Amino acid sequence: MDGSGIQNVLNQFRQLARLEFLAKECGESFPAGYMTLLDVARQVNLWWALDKVAVLCEQPTDLLRNQAGQLHNSEGPAMVYQNGWRVYSVNGEMVDPVAVLPREQITFELIETHRPFKKILVERYGKARYRVEVAERRRADGRDGGR
């Protein structure tokens, strides 16, 4: 499942959470089917109800979030399941595992070869350090503009 698919599932959970709040705190009543969905959501993690079958996933063994409640771990997987499947996310944005490598493993070359994650990698590498490296390489290549 890609990042947008996971975001859609998470949005469904948010919607169920709103229903649960309205039911408990505001005394709203909903059809029994909605309450059954809430019961399922409390006991499992990701799940899909299809026409004739439902797919249920176990709860993750690790789930890390930032203060805004978004999936987040800048140093590893944000969500890990017992079978080893992992989700990598930084501030709610799904990322490739390369984006959360330990800082000491991030190099200028790694940043340049993984352009989609350049912003995250440069932040972790150090913006000032990256600018110095860019300037040095431009000078070495003779592209310093005569400076």
Image (cartoon, rainbow, N blue to C red):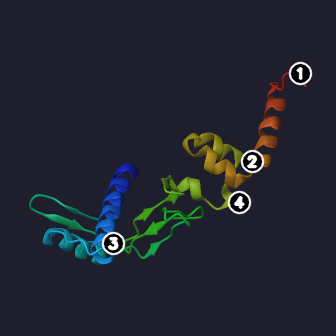
Mark toward the start of the polypeptide (2 vs 1): 2
Nearer-the-camera pick, 37 or 144: 37
Whether 122 is drawn above or below 86: the answer is: above
Residue depicted at x 64% and y 45%: 111
Residue depicted at x 15% and y 59%: 50
Circle 4 residue: 104
User: Element type at marker 2?
Assistant: helix
Task: Determine the CA span between mark 1 and mark 3.
Answer: 64 Å
User: Element type at marker 3?
Assistant: helix
* Amino acid at circle 3: Phe
Viewed as shown, does residue 57 lie left or right of 34? right
* Amino acid at circle 1: Gly
Circle 3 residue: 21
Q: Nearer the viewer, mark 2 or mark 3?
A: 3
* Amino acid at circle 2: Lys
Circle 2 residue: 127
Mark toward the start of the polypeptide (4 vs 1): 4
Residue depicted at x 79% and y 35%: 137
Residue depicted at x 28% and y 67%: 19
The number of numbered badges drawn on the structure is 4
Nearer-the-camera pick, 18 or 51: 18
Circle 1 residue: 146
User: Element type at marker 1?
Assistant: loop
Task: Determine the CA span between mark 3 and mark 4.
Answer: 44 Å
Mark toward the start of the polypeptide (3 vs 4): 3
Viewed as shown, does residue 138 lie left or right of 107? right
Q: Quadrant of residue 75?
A: bottom right
- Give the x, y percent position of residue 87: 44, 61
Estimate how packed mark 4 is, as few (under 14), some (14 to 19) or many (20 or more) residues with alpha carbons within 10 Å: few
Mark toward the start of the polypeptide (2 vs 3): 3
